[in-house]
Image (cartoon, helix red, strand yellow):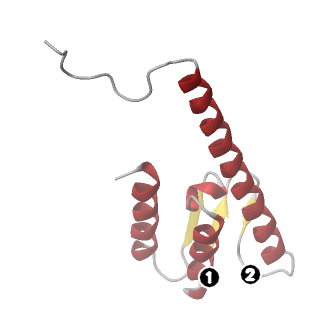
Amino acid sequence: MSGTSFRNEKVKEANRFHQVGDEVIVTRLERLGRSLKFIFEGIESTHKRGDCSKIINGSLNTKNDNPFATPMINLCEVFAQLELDLIKARTTEGREEAKAKGKHMGSLPALSDK
């Protein structure tokens, strides 16, 4: 299972665990999912149950008690997605550069040809 799949499963598990009125606290918004769609769905499902999410880094609370909550959540989600896309692009670029220089990618063989 990839890190992405594992994290998504753990987020779903956490969503099943908490009860109405609970507050889900995460360190960063992107910890709620690996894509904008998944993050938004998670926050929406949390709101439908009467819960809220609190993001420590950025001091964001998704409680629906003021008119700025939803636009701020959406804006933060867009930037979280941008950050993930930039990381993915840089990683791909670095991998391609390493391959062009002839560097071995992946695990080393466990057994020799002997």
Q: Quadrant of the C terminus?
A: top left
- Tell me residue 44's x, y (percent): 62, 80
Residue that lies at the very extreme toward the top in this rendered image:
114
Q: Name the residue rendered at 39%, 68% in the picture.
A: 13
Position of residue 16 in the picture relative to residue 47 (left or right) = left
- Mark yes or no: residue 51 visible: no
Q: Which mark is residue 64?
A: 2
Rounded to the nearest angstrom, the CA distance separating label 1 from label 2 is: 8 Å
Q: Which mark is residue 47?
A: 1
Q: For this rendering, which residue is in front, 2 or 111?
A: 111
Tell me which corner region of the image, top left, top right, bottom left or bottom right, holds residue 101: top right
Q: Name the residue rendered at 46%, 64% in the picture.
A: 11
Residue that lies at the very extreme toward the left in this rendered image:
114
Q: Name the residue rendered at 77%, 70% in the picture.
A: 74
- Tell me residue 79's x, y (percent): 77, 56
Q: How many marks?
A: 2
Determine whether label 1 and label 2 are within 8 Å by CB. Answer: yes
Tell me which corner region of the image, top left, top right, bottom left or bottom right, holds residue 68: bottom right
Q: Secondary structure at mark 2?
A: loop
Position of residue 108 in the picture relative to residue 105 (left or right) = left
- Tell me residue 17's x, y (percent): 39, 73
